Amino acid sequence: MGMDAHSNADEICAMRSNVPAPRGTTAAPAASVEHLTKIYGTGDAQVVALNDITVKIMPGQLTAVMGPSGSGKSTLMHCIAGLDRPTSGRALIGQTDVATLKDRDLTRLRRERIGFVFQQFNLVPTLTARENILLPLAIAGRKPDPDWYDEVLRVVDLADRLTHKPSQLSGGQQQRVACARALVGRPDIIFADEPTGNLDSVSAVEILQFLRRAVDDLGRTVVMVTHDPYSASYADRALFLADGRIVDDVSHPTHEIVMTTMAHLDPRRIDRASIPQSPSDLDPTPVSV
Amino acid sequence: MWKATFTSLWARKLRLAMSTLAIILGVAFVSGSFVFSDMIMNSFKGIISSTISDVDVAKDPGASVQGGNAATSGITPAVIERVKQVEGVQEAQGSIYGTGVIVIATSGKALASVGPPQMGFNWGTLPALGGQPGITLLSGREPRSDDEITMDPDTLARSGHGLSDAVKVITPNAGTIEVTVVGTATFGNGSTAGATYVFFTGHRAQQIFLDGADTYTGIWVVTAQDADRAATAGRIQKLLPTGYLARDGQVAADAQESSIQAAMGFIGPFLLIFAGVALLVASFLIVNTFTILVAQRSKELALFRAMGASKRQIMGTVLAEAFVLGVIGSGIGLFAGVGLAMVIKQGMKVMWDIGPARASLSTTAIVAALATGIVVTLLASLIPARRATHIAPIEAMSAAQTEPDKGLGRRAVVGVVLAGVGAVLIVLALTVKLPEPMVWAGAGMAAEMVGVAIASLLLGKPLVWLVGKLYRSAFGEVGKLAALNSLRQPRRTAATASALMVGLTLVSMIAIFGQSARASVVDQVRSTVRGDYIIGQQGFKEFPAQVAEKVAAVDEVQAVHQMKLGLFYHVPPGQQVPPADVLGDKAGRYVQPVGGMQPTSFNKVFTQTITSGRMFSAPREIIVEEETATKEKLRVGSTVTLYSRDAQATVEMTVVGIYSKGTGTTIVDTWVSTSTLEELGLGRNDVYLGIYLKPGADAAAARTALDRAVADMPLVSVMDLQEYTDQMLANLSQTMALLYGLLALSIVIAVLGIVNTLGLSIVERTREIGLLRAIALTRAQVRRMVALESVVIALLGAVIGIVLGTIFGIVLQRVLPEDQGITLLRIPAGQLTWFLVAAVVVGVLAALWPAHQAARTNVLEAIAAE
């Protein structure tokens, strides 16, 4: 874990937990929320998206945030990642309270300590795959650590696609580029918002395996928002949200446990709960959040 | 379907507001051009119709009184009495009219101007042509004694005087007189178009214009209501002395109008060229906007298609939307044009006041403006509308909502071909001796400009590449993103940049023209003008010969050399008088000015050297400048036949010498002895004095003494060489200011075009900007990215524009006839550099609003956007 690549971000580096704790231990959390509440709208139109949530995201883990549509799982991610401001409570990346940061510092935090993989439209269309991967580093004026860069490229298996524009890449390839971008700056934490939501099952498995390796081989911390039980089965831990509250917290979730829990949370899913067993059985048209 | 169209129109009101603005600006320029030329023409028409009576009796410009003087054979009161008896005549009054009546303002300065004339009249009470009001009293009363005058209200206001003030007036024959203003009056309801009207009593007018003889310069005839004007004119004609002509007033009015139209004719095309430029620029803007709008709507249109709407219906909605916008934009633009015309009029006031002309919309203006606005908008939306119908529903619903990037494609070919044709025309105009090289070069430049505008990105690609390099090193990744963004929609960037390009091409061309003209004038003055001090006015206006006497009396002055001026017309061989159309030409295109001086003043007024023959020594001997002599095939011993309208006489003169004027230019290229002019009753006044000081005289003291000597002569002032040059250039500076003003408007449109395009691009890239905000960019960086993209567009337009303008400027200087006096070519590099800097500033300013919008992008909404 080299510090050298981050030397121009001293105050942030000083705060970060650069050595991930081994899985299952109770080290300092990579991110956490304390009594986080998020309310949209006012008066009659008021919607409580998050209701007094407190949770810690442990480093070196792949955490899945699960829940039916409207459960607040995306809002939770947005609040932790500094994309949305909580109504009350705290959201921390390491020890930094993101809710108190000004736009400039927040942008810097996102650029240097967080990696993002969105459901779609992850890439800047004018840039090549390589340029997209290096974009956050380039904006920050940093050079990638060559060994780390090669390692990331090897893991996402994109070496021969680097000079392609996003329009020349398949959906799966685009998501892999996005993953590489999220990883290359060695962020404290990677947020993946429905990363497989728009992909065919084969590509989806590739991405899930990749996220898994990011944790296992590269020692990253990943938070993945998903509504898909199969995806969740790749996680070390699954948080289940319903109506803005955490209703369950499962370690080493299996496909079956996730299915059962989800079915319990969302009655609409019961009749379909037992079917998908393998990636090829995944629902090809996922419901978006 | 229709309801959906209107709902969708409303939903995108911001974008619509921007495209409507594009239409408004384009149409405003077109309608403004029409309104302004109408304003000028109407102000003249108003004057003409109320300054002419039912039957117009005046000196016949085509007649010649051999060797006689008009003043001696004028219209006597007896003639008028006889005219009153003519069948069909209801009433007749003698009228007197002349020019050169100059009012002196409270400041002591003469209210003289180069353009409109300063006219004097005797007071008349009869109605004008067709019973319209003639001389109309506006305040006070008419002049009743010789020391009273009435003048037009504008001149009174400009003079700073009020009613019943004592005013000094300079007159042609009676010197400076002191009179009292007792009222204000004008002809009809018309304005004076910047001219001065001073009304005197008949007796005073005779003193001023007719050397006190009891005659008139014309007759103001009112016909009986049912009388045939032409027949009455015929009957009156028989009673008139030779050299006078009675005409149907309507015929006279039409003739005057058409000659004024010919003289003012340049204004219409001139403004229409600007309107054309504006329209071209606005069309780019409109096409651009609609292409983007429809592209962004493709998803919605595809949904309509999926729901069963036919291609025809889709086409219909897009065109209907364009039509609604076209009508609204053109409607507003039409009236905005009236405002624009008023602004131009105010802007022009410094150099040419056309008086309180009222702006009105003629049918032509309305039709032209509305048609252009609506047709251009419809055409602009036709291409994207066609594209919209060709998109398969499924494809459109899943694809990104952007205009397909097809590069420049066919447009580049068309542009390059057009530019090639233009280049060939320009080269032909410069190298081959074509008739009317200006027309060829003009057409070539127009084709070149449009061609380059169409293909601008093709030509600009290296430039954008270079700017991209610079950006990368100066602004890093943000600069790179900006440069890449400017290249992602080449057509859009090209069209947006073209708008600015067109404006800057013209601005640069004019800058070069102005600088060359300035340098040429300075050069000419320096190599032409002799003497230590000069008295002379722009346009060689006459001043009394007393000035020379007073100057000669100054101690320090050694000699004063006078120049006089006679205006002649060439008489074709075998004829006595020039053709009527030559004489009737109010624009003065055929006037041949002949200078007059004492034989001893040779090479003392202006630089002159005899190259063959000798200097004139006797009347009716003439010397001719060598180039003119070659052109007109004149040699020593040739005869020249000239006609003077003022003297109504034809004279034959013998060329006795050919001279060279060196590199300089003067307005006259033929000179005669003052005695030649005096013989014809001309040359009473001087137009120019070359003043020589005694050797060793104190220049400062001499200047003070000279200034004092002419202090009571409001028309003249003493100038040194530098002041004289400045005076020569004053008009040029004003013309340049006006041209820059007009072009500034086209640049404003171009800037709004950049704002529009960028704004729409930002909307289109919402998701991408959201992504960039999420993963990397601060708000400030987003703003910078947009600003840099804007600067790329501005620079692209500016660089191509300036290069093209420089070429055009050089071509213009080369192709202009030599007698226009632009002999030197000067490229104002500093000024052109400033244009480039200004373009960068313009780019930054244009980006302010779009950049603000982009920076405000809500990251969550953007990444969640469908």
Image: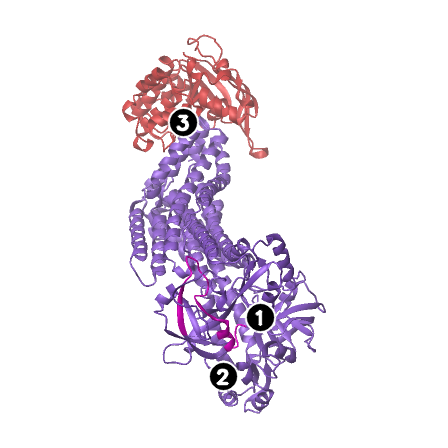
Chain colours: A red, B purple
Q: Which mark is residue B113?
A: none
Residue occupying the far left of the picture: A160
Question: Circle 2 sits on which residue?
Answer: B243
Residue occupying the far front of the picture: B695
Expressed as whole percent of the image width and height from the top left, the position of residue B784 reads 47, 33
Q: Nearer the viewer, residue B424 or B282?
A: B424
Mark toward the start of the polypeptide (1 vs 2)? 1
Q: In this view, does B542 lie to the left or right of B431?
A: right
Badge 2 density bin: few <14, some 14–19, many ≥20, Cα 10 Å: some
Expressed as whole percent of the image width and height from the top left, the position of residue B812 reads 38, 55
Question: Circle 3 sits on which residue?
Answer: A118
Expressed as whole percent of the image width and height from the top left, the position of residue B669 reads 43, 66
Chain at numbered mark 3: A
Instruction: Tell me the quarter of the picture where residue B616 sits.
Output: bottom left
Badge 1 density bin: few <14, some 14–19, many ≥20, Cα 10 Å: many
Q: Which of A54 and B62 is in front in this view?
A: B62
Question: Circle 1 sits on which residue?
Answer: B100
